[in-house]
Image (spheres, rainbow, N blue to C red):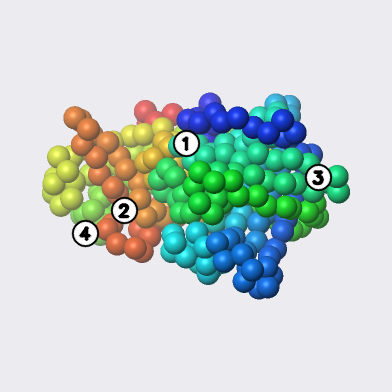
Amino acid sequence: MRGWLSLTVLLLPTPLMAELPPPGCYARDYDAAHLAAHPQQGVAGLRLWYFTEDDAGETPAALVEARMAEQGQASRDGVGGAVLTQLAVCDAQGACYVECDGGLFTTEVTAEGGLRLSTQRFRVGEGDSCGGASDLAEVEGRTTAYLLDPAPAEACESLWRTHPLPAPGCYGVTYSDMGHGQGLLGMRLYLRAPDSGFAFPQAEGTFRVTLPDGGRAREAGMGAARIAVPIWCSSRDGFCRSGIDEGALRVVPMGEDALALETTRFLVYGPEAANLDIAVPGPAPTRHQLQRMPADACRGME
């Protein structure tokens, strides 16, 4: 099962004229004069890429990119000037939903072939946990509408461009002590071959960490534990995840025989709901470099 399709959605009535638009790119940029005349609007630019996630055309989806202004909901949420993205799964009536109950938007195709996008709540800004950094709705619960024009695919390249995944196999690193390992003694990553037949191939596998009997691991009640979790890694954004709200590992291929893992939050769980964030506390990402290892180094992870 593809991880991001696990949705908790709030089903709301949709307009009678709502419909799923043709696949492709839709865009709108707002100039300074428009934003000055609409001070509540915190979106300075919007891109939508509609596509079908599977080759069979049975899973319509949309990728959203919002360039935030220095006003409106962007200022309220502290994201002025940021570029925030989101993935949504759509239905045949034109409603597109965010996982983690992050809201929805509906679309109507205009006579000119553009879109009228309407929402009362649609969270944007994918991160390490559920929700988003801001909202396409200027005020939650009140309808905000955007008129978008059809645009060439190149205008949405940042949304449809795929990220490379490492070759399948076993990767790992072993540390001499928890100081050298940033609180860990070692980690292993086993990846299977990416699936086929999807717009954004995804590789499933297993991630395992070995914790020391000291430091943050002991404080969390997980000293000397070895924890393995199933993961999926997506070429859509180059991140590996184990669940909806457990954080993410950014995968950076480094040739055929090495990769780097970067994270600002990734939880592993022990007995009795104990958990540990393997990222070192602080704003900077925690980075580990893994080398390709013999298959038996990942024994039991297949």
Name the front one of labels 1 and 2. Answer: 1
- Tell me the SS state at disc 4: loop
**Residue pictured at 36% horizontal, 34% vertical:** 229
Observer able to see residue 153:
no
Looking at the image, tell me whether mark 4 or mark 2 is earlier in sequence order: 4
- Which residue, given by chain and number where applicable, does mark 1 sit on? 101
- Tell me the SS state at disc 3: loop
State how far apart marks 1 and 4 are (Cα).
39 Å
State how far apart marks 1 and 3 are (Cα).
28 Å
Q: Is residue 241 above or below residue 260?
A: above
Q: Is residue 291 left or right of residue 225?
A: right
Identity, as a three-letter code, of the amino acid under mark 4? Gly
Q: Residue furthest right?
A: 112
- Which residue, given by chain and number where applicable, does mark 4 sit on? 179
Instruction: Give 139 or 260, whichever is nearer the viewer.
Output: 139
**Residue pictured at 60% horizontal, 30% vertical:** 13
**Residue pictured at 49% horizontal, 41% vertical:** 102
Q: On residue 110, which mark appears?
A: 3
Looking at the image, tell me whether mark 1 or mark 2 is earlier in sequence order: 1
Identity, as a three-letter code, of the amino acid under mark 2? Ala
In percent of width and height, residue 82 lies at 53, 64
- Which residue, given by chain and number where applicable, does mark 2 sit on? 279
Identity, as a three-letter code, of the amino acid under mark 3? Thr
State how far apart marks 3 and 2 are (Cα).
47 Å
Characterize the local packing of mark 1: few (<14), some (14-19) or many (20 or more) Cα atoms within 10 angstroms: some
State how far apart marks 3 and 4 are (Cα).
60 Å
Q: Is residue 276 above or below residue 295?
A: below
- Tell me the SS state at disc 1: loop
Please say if the residues under marks 1 and 2 sit with CB atoms less than 8 Å apart.
no
Characterize the local packing of mark 4: few (<14), some (14-19) or many (20 or more) Cα atoms within 10 angstroms: few
